Image: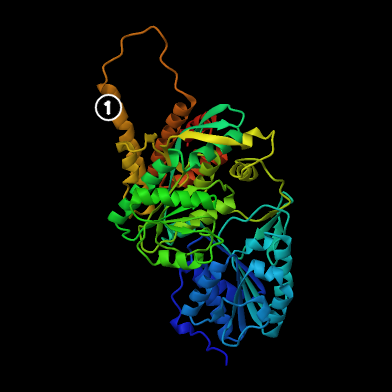
Amino acid sequence: MSPPLPDLETFPPLRDWQRKALVGYLRRRSDDYMAVATPGAGKTTFALRIAAELLADGTVEAVTVVCPTEHLKVQWAAAAGRVGIQLDHAFRNADIHSSRDFHGAVLTYAQVGMAPAVHRRRTMTRPTLVILDEIHHAGDSRSWGDGVKAAFEPAERRLMLTGTPFRSDENPIPFVSYERGDDGLQRSRADSVYGYSDALRDGVVRPVLFMAYSGETRWRTNAGDELAARLGEPMTKDLIAQAWRTALDYRGGWMPQVLRAADARLTKLREHGIVDAGGLIIASDQQTARAYAKLIGEISGQPATVVLSDDEGASKRIATFAASQDRWMVAVRMVSEGVDIPRLAVGVYATSASTPLYFAQAIGRFVRARRPGETATVFLPSVPHLLGLASEMEAQRDHVLGLPKQKDGLDDDLLERAQREENAEGELEKQFEALSATAELDQVIYDGASFGMGAMTGTAEEEEYLGLPGLLTPDQVSVLLNKRQADQLAAKKRQKAAEPPAPAQREAPPVMTAGERRNSLRRQLNTLVAAHHHRTNLPHGKIHAELRRLCGGPPSAQATIEQLEERIATIQTL
């Protein structure tokens, strides 16, 4: 006996973007539809409402959902069950046919890739709606893409969902439409787009503050050479990778200091409005994850939940943590995409993964708003490429075919090699021993702008930023960060004025280092942007974006001294 149809009258109310997209979908009634919506915006609810509509009017008799992971299968089935759509998350390829107790099944892309013929037969048995969640995964491998295409070509309807930037490669994603631009490149075309900036304006997602920590790092190569570098300073990709790895070493000083700051921020949020706020540390590998869990447990006084992707009980631990009041979870990749833990409000990005795709997936875990005014804070190393990604949270990226692979930013292959133990002789740069690392707050990035003058960990200056209230509107976040920066600058001026005057010397005054000069220019630029905002009421992020359009170059967190000087000169003429 088939289960009863979902009742549209009792369906949860839709947000504005969901309602507009639903009307557009029902009006077009096309075979394929792609919705792009930022993490936390409600893609699952939107898709289930379409499924309910199509089941109710008889367009389809079955629903198949395809998602990236086993945990998300359980999550999808639970969400569907709450609105009266019964999906079998335990369906196996060996079962061949779906049970009539369900409206359909939830599968993974890997599962479809292994037996596309099984799922093609299922799709042909009954008119079926296929929901392809995080559709970019259909391009992860040729077998997955071919399997998805073969299995679901006969479907009555296909709905594609994604909330993260598409990859740039040569693998067309099945059922996605592409349009050729003036430059000759083909770009994916979405039927509905709801970006982070739209969701932030509507109060659907939280504003995210990125607290970037720099510091001195020292390591020894297996040739016996000792090297030192400061995170955030310009250097070669090899040195960036090794300095980054040294900072993330759990035996050094950088990670404990940053974890201490992150735990202090979590306490502040719990004390000032987000009483159940949770934290997530994203690690590069399992050994490091366990070590981070021990560190944060010692700092917070409470054991951390550890989630490993190949652990049989991972889904249960995620669900238990989501429903608890526990402070910290440590994970390797699994808690990155689609996993719904709305109380996560503090993150530590302690992994070497640096692609826009992975970064957006990870940050998406912290943006889900439950009530107006909630904010999120993510701690990360002051690495130029990461700072650029943090500054471009609102960027919308389509899937591009035929685009040459660019070498801007950090090379993930290099970082991956740096994370592995290499035995081959002659590759000295990939083998080293981390000696020491210190941490200090370099800057706070919000809405594309950089704030702060730097502060050592454990100081009153750092506390000023860690102590920001947890319940703020986006505009209040900008105002407070500008005030904190102005107060910090005024305090330094008072301190300098109170110092006894130095005896007159004939020597020229000391020249600022490149780092000091760049920080000074960033502060000057932010002050001018804030003044322009008050004159024009334009958001800070749009002003920075316009300066980048006029002058070129990366976000201000990555910009060179020359680029900052050019932007300062330009904004003074606006």
Q: Nearer the viewer, residue 145 or 538?
A: 145
Q: Nearer the viewer, residue 155 or 430?
A: 430
Locate residue 74, reporting x and y percent: 52, 72
Which residue in the protein does label 1 denote?
494
Viewer-proximal residue among 501 and 456? 456
Relative to 81, say whether 281 is above or below: above
| Above-or-below relation of 559 to 106 | above
Name the foreground residue: 136 vs 38.
136
Would residue 570 be seen by someone viewing this image from the given angle? Answer: no
Residue 110 in the image: above or below residue 535: below
Image quarter in which the N terminus is found: bottom right
User: Of the residues shown, which amino acid type is indicated by label 1?
Assistant: Arg
**In the current view of this chain or complex, which residue is farthest to the top?**
506
Q: For residue 495, which quarter of the picture? A: top left
Q: Is residue 36 left or right of residue 490?
A: right
Query: Visible in this render: residue 223?
Result: yes
For the point 62% across and 56% down, which residue is it?
166
Q: How many marks?
A: 1
Which image quarter: residue 237? top right
Label 1 CA crowd tier, 10 Å (few <14, some 14–19, many 20+) = few
Q: Residue at x 30, y 58 (%)?
A: 273
- The colour scheme applied to this rendered structure is rainbow
Residue 302 locus on image (x, y percent)? 35, 55
User: In the visual, does 532 lie left or right of 417?
Assistant: left
Q: Is residue 56 above or below residue 467?
A: below
Q: Position of residue 460 (x, y in %)?
A: 30, 37
Indicate the secondary structure of the residue bearing disc 1: helix
Q: Position of residue 359 (x, y in %)?
A: 54, 51
Q: Residue at x 37, y 45 (%)?
A: 260
Q: Residue at x 51, y 59 (%)?
A: 335
